[in-house]
Amino acid sequence: MFFSKNEKPNTNWLNQYFKFNISGLEKNLTRKKETYWQSLGQKNALEIFHAAAEKVPAYKDFLKKNKVIHAKIKTIADFSQIPPTDKQNYIQTYSLNQRSWHGQVTDSKLIASSSGTSGSPNYWPRGGGQEYEAAITHELLFRQLFNIQKLKTLCIVGFPMGVYVSGMATSLPLWVLSQKYNLSLLSAGNNKTEVLKAVKNLGKNFEQILLVGHPFFIKDVLETGKAEGVDWKKTKVGMMFCSEGFSEAWREYLLKEAGLNGARAYNTYGSSEMLLMAYETQTSIQVRKLLEQQKSAAYELLGNAQVPNLFQYNPALRFIEEKGKELLFTSASGLPLIRFNLHDAGKILSREKVLGTAEKYKPEIAKHEGWQLPFVSLEGRSDYTVIFYAANIYPQHIHAGLGNAGFISKITGKFTMTKGYRKNMDEYLEINIELRQKVKINGKLRHHIQKTIVEKLKEINAEYNFLWQNLNKDIRPQIKLWQYQHPKYFTPGLKPHYIANP
């Protein structure tokens, strides 16, 4: 078993990793049925629950307040009745020590940070057991998707380093892999110049180069490299992303820029709280392309024509449930989380259902021998958060920007956010704002609002401020002013919607 539900003092996790039979797991992933992995995930979820109920002060108190006696929770049906946790009722209610194993955050080995809605950071400790899991997960993915067991590989990590989770959470497991494979790791951070220097000066020594980072950053690297004379067609390039979704048109654009044929660009689903949770595979990409091309297939599988991001996941590592169109996660970490609601909207889809639908429209997809794992769709944030260039833009932050005395008398306070893509697939963030009655649309007011919102985002949103300081793009929101009760976004009587389709 490669799952570790709790930290064990003095465990040599690096030694455990080298003892692990990765080829045996690969065989099991293709041979053992999906029900096996679901059953293992249910068993692990119950074990994590009982361990947290006994050893985590915050969760013990949470169960007490909700009148849950953990000893009576014996089946997964019992487990499904436990009240979910989220940032409001758990993370913001209890201290960091209270949420840690044995009430001691000092037992953690690594601490990452993420921005909260208030601008104050949330800290996410983890231990050696999580790095052990991460190494195995990355090994599986990099063997399956990029054949690192066969090719001399230069892996350039372009995620931001520092307190943010993505850089360290990718570099650490890849360094572990480099001790076992012919893989060289270069952690450039989100520094485009350094990434391209490495490609130009080191790339010829390797059989393939893997670029790992946020989708928009890798896109910028490819475009700039092409402008500087890098012939991506002469280089075997692989890409892995996280933090943002994209369409198949976006993927095709990127592959065209890199001169690649076939699927060599894969997205993953992760979070600061639980690291890597799910991942694209060749099968998931083929299914998603089908759903975008055949709307009837999308309706049959998803119930609507809007095609979400689609991943596979291993329940034994991250147990995922679907409740009220939102996803709940159970995972052991430095801060164990039980039925935790990230407020990500999505669905759990069985492999049988996904491939059964695909077979009706494109039989060759169902014949593909892939991992016998379930699928999870990710439709976006259900808490009105827009992910813009990997920064979480919260409605609270926009509200704060609109509270400026210089123009507050000219607007109603209602707004709607939209994220879209330009022709070159760069992102834009549009904020549509309702004016008060008899206030006229004018450029001076629009510019004043834009400047104020940008300054407020830089002040209270650490992720946006990081992008402002490091991303060489215009990330100012586009401000559009609308007359009072305009029917497009501000029909009277309707509940305000903070997010709308472009």
Image: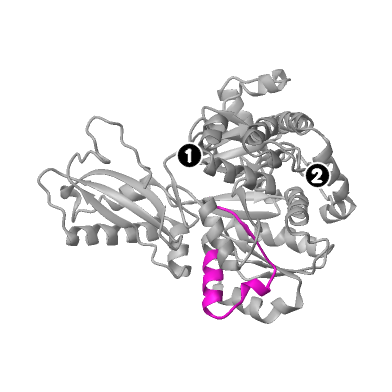
Which amino acid type corresponds to the residue marked 1 in the rendered image? Answer: Gln
Number of numbered markers: 2
Q: Which mark is residue 306?
A: 1
What element does badge 2 sit on?
A: loop
Q: Which mark is residue 502?
A: none
Contact, mark 2 vs mark 1 (Cβ under 8 Å): no
Which amino acid type corresponds to the residue marked 2 in the rendered image? Answer: Lys
Instruction: Give above or below for 164 relative to 9.
Output: below
* Residue 491 appears left or right of 7: left
Region of the chain picked out in magenta, as a range: 219-245
Instruction: Give above or below for 265 relative to 496.
Output: below
* Residue 284 appears left or right of 31: left
| Residue at 78% from the left image edge and 56% from the top image edge | 143
Residue furthest out toward the top: 72
Marks 2/1: CA–CA distance: 45 Å
Residue 428 colored in magenta in the image: no
Q: Indicate the quadrant where residue 163 lies.
A: bottom right
* Residue 355 appears left or right of 455: right
- The residue beneath circle 2 is 8
Q: Nearer the viewer, residue 369 or 483?
A: 369
Instruction: Give above or below for 454 relative to 117.
Output: below
Q: Looking at the picture, how far across and down is residue 56, in whole percent?
A: 67, 36
* Image quarter hosting the N terminus: top right
Residue furthest out toward the left: 438
Q: Looking at the picture, how far across and down is residue 444, in whole percent?
A: 18, 62
Q: Nearer the viewer, residue 9 or 432?
A: 432
The disc, 2 or 1, on the residue closer to the chain's N-terminal end is 2
Residue 241 colored in magenta in the image: yes
What element does badge 1 sit on?
A: loop
| Residue at 48% from the left image edge and 33% from the top image edge | 304
In the rendered image, is residue 19 in sight?
yes
